[in-house]
Image (cartoon, helix red, strand yellow):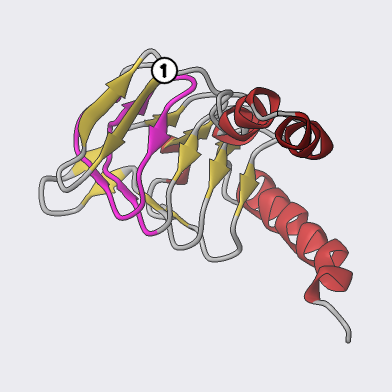
Amino acid sequence: MRSLNQLLWLQRLLVKLRWAYFVKFWGMDIHPSTVMSLSVRLDKTYPRGVHIGPDSYLAFEVAVLAHDMTRGLYCDTYIGSRCFIGARSIILPGVRIGDGSIVGSGSVVTKDVPPASIVAGNPARVIRRNIETSRLGRLRSAGKHKEQEEQALPEPGVELAAREAG
């Protein structure tokens, strides 16, 4: 059976073309190592106000705004390096998301997010501080719990041999 993973090269190509479109045509400040879903919506009313740092990831249907027509506001919106912005989140104009931060899915970010923190909710609130993220905003501790549990468990044959001997 064929897998959609065979078309991963096409998705990556489309993401790179979209990045070039945002940067070259609209003048947005997006680092080349940023990864964005094809459904991400970036503000084209004030495109020069969108700034996204290196090694950050924007999941599907994220909206990054740099203007507010009702208040006549045009300001820069910054997403730092190694950030993860969860699906369907909205980043309002003038917000700064600090380096190494994570925004939970469906969050509405109305205020600045401190570096190395997790925010979630509507409006987004800090739920954890002093986290460590790696590339694309992945928690450094992700996956380590399983490794630690495996190290604590005896090898499969050892436990059975100990029961038979005892």
Q: Which residue is mark 1?
A: 116
What's the amino acid at mark 1? Ala
- Taking 27 as reference, is 13 above or below it? below
Horizontal relation, residue 142 to residue 33: left or right: left
Considering every residue shown, the one lying at the far top of the view is 130
Horizontal relation, residue 119 to residue 27: left or right: left
Q: Residue at x 11, y 53 (%)?
A: 70
Horizontal relation, residue 11 to residue 118: left or right: right
Horizontal relation, residue 104 to residue 26: left or right: left
Considering depth in this image, is 74 or 78 the residue closer to the camera? 78
Number of residues whose C-alpha sits closer than 10 Å to that of mark 1, classed few (under 14), some (14–19) or many (20 or more): many
Where is residue 24 shown, x and y percent of the image? 68, 46
Quarter of the image that includes the C terminus: top right
| Residue 30 appears in the picture as rendered | no
Task: Please tell me whether residue 96 belongs to the stretch shown in magenta.
Answer: yes
Considering every residue shown, the one lying at the far left of the view is 71
Where is residue 101 shown, x and y percent of the image? 43, 26
Q: Residue at x 64, y 23 (%)?
A: 152
Considering depth in this image, is 27 or 123 the residue closer to the camera? 123
Q: Which residues are magenta?
A: 88-113
Using the rendered view, name the quadrant where residue 111 is placed. Answer: top left
Q: How many labels, in total?
A: 1
Task: Please tell me whether residue 5 belongs to the stretch shown in magenta.
Answer: no
Considering depth in this image, is 115 or 50 the residue closer to the camera? 115
The dominant secondary structure in magenta is loop
Where is residue 143 shown, x and y percent of the image? 62, 34
Q: Residue at x 35, y 44 (%)?
A: 104
Considering depth in this image, is 39 or 121 the residue closer to the camera? 121
